[in-house]
Amino acid sequence: MLRSRENLFHNMGLKEALQRAAPEEAPTKALRRVDHLIQKVGIGILGCVERYYEAYKKKPNEANAKKYCLWRLRLHRKLKNDRAILDAINEVRNLGLYDEAPGDLCWDYDFGR
């Protein structure tokens, strides 16, 4: 018994199957440098930092501040505190990396460059 992929190649010619399986051409518009940096870091961690920063701004209590500071610290650790990359991402996304109100900033930490 053929697997589904083998069946696809068997029923259609190999060339036609590869054309159907291959993604369409990427748009000609090139990604910005910051988009590549965001992709390198991961949209998940940036989304968490941004979401917890918004939650802290809506309701600035100690619990929200701790959660936000934890995710901000994780972001700094992931990028080994590379100021150039963090500044570039902070300009585009609302991350609050320079906001001192929730807690200590992470710029002075050494994460083993």
Image (cartoon, rainbow, N blue to C red):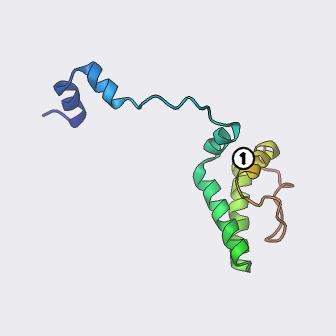
What residue do we see at 72% from left, 58% from top? 94
Which quadrant would the N terminus be assigned to in this image? top left
Which quadrant would the C terminus be assigned to in this image? top right
Total count of labels = 1
Give the image location of residue 16, x and y in percent: 27, 22
What residue do we see at 82% from left, 46% from top? 83
Pointer 1: what residue? 79
Instruction: State the residue lying farthest toward the right.
Output: 108
Determine which quarter of the picture holds residue 30. top right
Instruction: Tell which of 38 and 66 is nearer to you.
Output: 38
Give the image location of residue 55, x and y in percent: 66, 72
Instruction: Say left or right for 16 vs 26.
Output: left
Instruction: Tell which of 9 and 34 is nearer to you.
Output: 34
Instruction: Tell which of 53 and 63 is nearer to you.
Output: 53
Q: Is residue 97 visible?
A: yes
Q: Amino acid at mark 1?
A: Leu
Instruction: Tell which of 32 and 89 is nearer to you.
Output: 32
Q: Is residue 92 above or below residue 34?
A: below
Determine which quarter of the picture holds residue 10. top left
At mark 1, the secondary structure is loop
Give the image location of residue 86, x and y in percent: 76, 48
Q: Is residue 43 above or below residue 51?
A: above
Give the image location of residue 101, x and y in percent: 83, 71
What residue do we see at 82% from left, 64% from top? 99
Q: Residues within 10 Å of mark 1 (few under 14, many from 20)?
A: some
Instruction: Say left or right for 82 vs 15.
Output: right
Q: Is residue 81 visible?
A: no
Instruction: State the residue lying farthest toward the left.
Output: 1
